[in-house]
Image: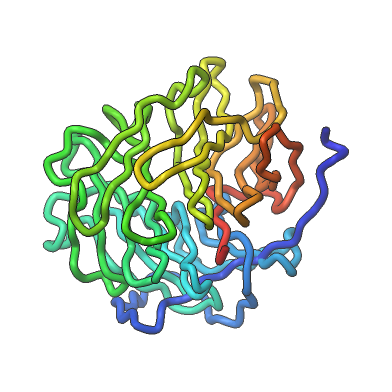
Amino acid sequence: MMGMRRWFGAVVAVGLLGACEPFEDGGGGGTIGEVTFDRGFAFVRGDRNIYVVDDDGDPNSPQRLTTSGNAFTPSISNDGRSIVFVQRVGNTTSLQTVPTTGGPVATLLSSNDVACGTCTNFRGPTFSPDGRTIVFAFDRGSGAVSSLARIAVNGSGFTELTPGTTISHGSPSFLPNGTTVVAPAGSSAFQYNQLAFVPVNGGSPSYVSSLGNEVLTIVNRAVVSPDGRQVALDARLSSGSTRIFVGNVTSTGLSGALRRLTDYTASTVQESFPSWTSSTELGFLFNDSGGDPSIYRAPVSSTASSVSLAVPAANEPFYGPR
């Protein structure tokens, strides 16, 4: 199957939205700009900086957007101008943005800010389809279950979406209409065995607990396709390996059974961090037998697919704009 893999170019960079006026952190470690980006992957490397590679660029020469390290889980806005990510320094986490064209890093919210109280461990931020808000997961104090929250793209208006929850929630993904996010859910961050459908403007979440016999837990994320008809997630199997699964989705749940994306069967294969490159293709992290993780692509169909190498030596990928 390795012979079926082929190279793809990719370069992604992200910029701040025009309506956004976040605090520009002089120590944020941004670049001087001049990055070329239209569409492609954002990701981190071993130095924990944000990189991008355009679909028309050289995947062997990605462009770096940050310099301070400690960056996690970048996500690209729907207009392709901005990337939001988590920075972790000691016990403090913050939500930061950086332009896709390169430039200064801006801090939107930190875990020690008065606005969010005892919130800690930010993760999985994502832009709303209209680019006006960001939804993310966080912990409410040490040992507490994780919740979801919303802020404006300038960092204001912190609002908890799942207050008083007894269920933990992971990295969210918007449905195209922008009214609901889908997120892994379960008894803890290590037991995401459900999907939560959470309204972002008030209302009670709904939960899907039947994910099929193969899926023990969701490892990192569940993401909705650009047309809103499918969801992809990375699932831990009983063998200990991780595979990407795809299923049909409605506004409140799944329709039918989940199916594997690829045709790999070896227990050494690890697939994670799915991101839709279109409504018929996924990009994701692929690792076999403990080698360096890289980004691959695979078509989404009713049967399992082969994969193609997109970007070598990359982690936590996100594709955009879609």
Residue 277 vertical position relative to residue 245 in the rendered view, above or below: below
Name the foreground residue: 299 vs 61.
299
Query: For residue 61, which quarter of the picture?
Result: bottom right
Apparent side of residue 205 relative to residue 181 in the rendered image (left or right): left
Q: Residue at x 83, y 33 (%)?
A: 1
Where is residue 311? Give x, y as percent. 70, 53
Q: Is residue 291 left or right of residue 49?
A: right
Between 187 and 31, the one lying in front of the other is 187
Q: What scheme was used to colour the molecule?
A: rainbow
Is 117 left or right of 199, judged from the image as shown? left
Give the residue furthest to the right: 3
Percent across and percent down for residue 240 are 54, 20
**Quick check: can you spot residue 91?**
no
In the image, 258 versus 240, the foreground residue is 258
Position in image of residue 124 (x %, y %): 39, 50
Quarter of the image containing the C terminus? Answer: bottom right
Q: In the rendered view, would you say 126 is above or below 166?
A: below
